[in-house]
């Protein structure tokens, strides 16, 4: 083609696919890396670069080793990279070992806690929740706000919107955000607190990862659109209940509780349908 001086239409079957230019598996890692860079350069959201790199390295290494040992194949590292970078951003600890251990727990949960070839928990949510419960004296989570600077928050929201829109999960994020805002108003009314203080957490960097990556994870959400919206709503319900008991890590624990229950119910319903179909075929 390069030798031709006259443009010639490429036959449809030979036309290069635009999607092939960038493997779809790299899209989410690229976006979350942009979120990390924006957050770090504007507000310094990372505990340190070495700790984040340790989390990412451990996550990818665990994915490759476990995938090879348990599935007899080399898995693509994109998912592990997202888990590792999420751990690196969300976790706060003066020590290094929690970052490695959290990543290891996160990835291991994908291969151990499975039902009918599906893992029930979002890996990074499982790892972070486990660390918060098991080592509360050593581990905390990212909780700083974006302050009064609107531009970084807008950049993060645009990037996050593009991610969930591309994977057709925008309705999950929208359902959760609307539910959160409504329940924030309810908490404000019941607790006699300013509405702004109840809404403020969702503007923090922790929540950006939560609403754009954790609750929308295609591998750990139910399949039906209605079920996805219902699960997002129930996460907001459980989070609100936990906030009444002053739970600092309410969103993580809410997803930890609701996510696997929703997946387990769907797996059970699928089994019932398959059994009914098999019985119908046998009778027919």
Image (cartoon, grey):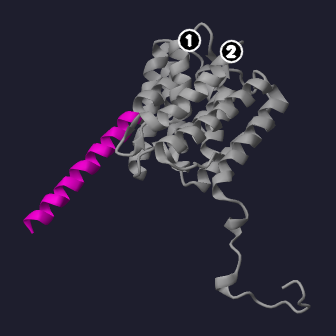
> Residue, x 62% and y 29% (percent of image)?
202
**Residue 194 seen in the figure:** yes
Q: How many numbered marks appear?
A: 2
Q: Which of the two residues, 122 or 154, is positioned nearer the viewer here? A: 122
Nearer to us in this view, 15 or 143: 15
Stretch of the chain drawn in magenta: 260-284
Image quadrant for the N terminus? bottom right
* Sequence-first disc among 2 and 1: 2
Q: Which mark is residue 65?
A: none
- Residue 234 sits in which quadrant? top left
Disc sitting over residue 93 in the figure: 2
Residue 124 or 184: which is nearer the viewer?
124
Residue sitting at x 54%, y 44%: 68
Categorize mark 1 by other alpha carbons within 10 Å: few (<14), some (14-19), many (20+). few
Q: CA distance from mark 2 to mark 1?
A: 10 Å
Q: Is residue 185 visible?
A: no
Q: Quadrant of residue 5?
A: bottom right
- Find residue 136 and report its horizontal and vertical position in percent: 56, 10
Q: Position of residue 218 (x, y in %)?
A: 51, 48
Quarter residue 116 falls in:
top left
- In this view of the protein, which residue sits in the foreground, 263 or 233? 263
Residue 230: give x, y in percent of width and height.
40, 41
Q: For the residue carrying disc 2, how many other residues have a C-alpha within 10 Å: few (<14), some (14-19), or many (20+)?
A: some
- Residue 47 lies, with reference to residue 176, above or below; the image says above
Circle 2 — which element?
loop
Asked whether residue 275 is drawn in magenta, I would say yes
Q: Determine the residue positioned at 45% across, 44% down.
A: 221
Q: Which residue is mark 1?
A: 135
């Amino acid at each position: 083609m390069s030798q031709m001086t006259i443009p010639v239409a490429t036959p449809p079957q030979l036309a290069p696919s635009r999607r092939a230019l960038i493997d779809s598996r790299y899209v989410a890692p690229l976006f979350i890396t942009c979120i990390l860079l924006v957050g770090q350069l504007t507000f310094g959201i990372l505990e340190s670069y070495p700790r984040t790199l340790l989390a990412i390295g451990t996550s990818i290494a665990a994915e490759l080793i476990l995938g090879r040992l348990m599935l007899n194949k080399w898995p693509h590292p994109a998912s592990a990279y997202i888990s590792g970078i999420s751990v690196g951003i969300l976790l706060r600890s003066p020590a290094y070992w929690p970052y490695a251990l959290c990543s290891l727990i996160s990835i291991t949960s994908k291969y151990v806690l499975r039902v009918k070839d599906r893992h029930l928990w979002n890996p990074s949510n499982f790892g972070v929740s486990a660390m918060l419960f098991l080592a509360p004296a050593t581990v905390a989570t990212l909780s700083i706000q974006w302050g009064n600077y609107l531009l970084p928050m807008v950049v993060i929201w645009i990037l996050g919107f593009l991610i969930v829109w591309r994977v057709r999960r925008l309705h999950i994020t929208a359902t959760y955000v609307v539910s959160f805002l409504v329940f924030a108003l309810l908490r404000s009314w019941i607790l006699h607190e300013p509405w702004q203080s109840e809404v403020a957490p969702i503007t923090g960097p922790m929540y950006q990862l939560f609403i754009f990556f954790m609750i929308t994870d295609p591998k750990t959400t139910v399949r039906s659109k209605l079920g996805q919206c219902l699960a997002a709503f129930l996460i907001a319900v459980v989070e609100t209940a936990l906030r009444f008991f002053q739970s600092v890590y309410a969103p993580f624990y809410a997803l930890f509780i609701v996510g696997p229950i929703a997946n387990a119910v769907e797996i059970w319903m699928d089994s019932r349908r398959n059994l009914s179909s098999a019985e119908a075929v046998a009778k027919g």
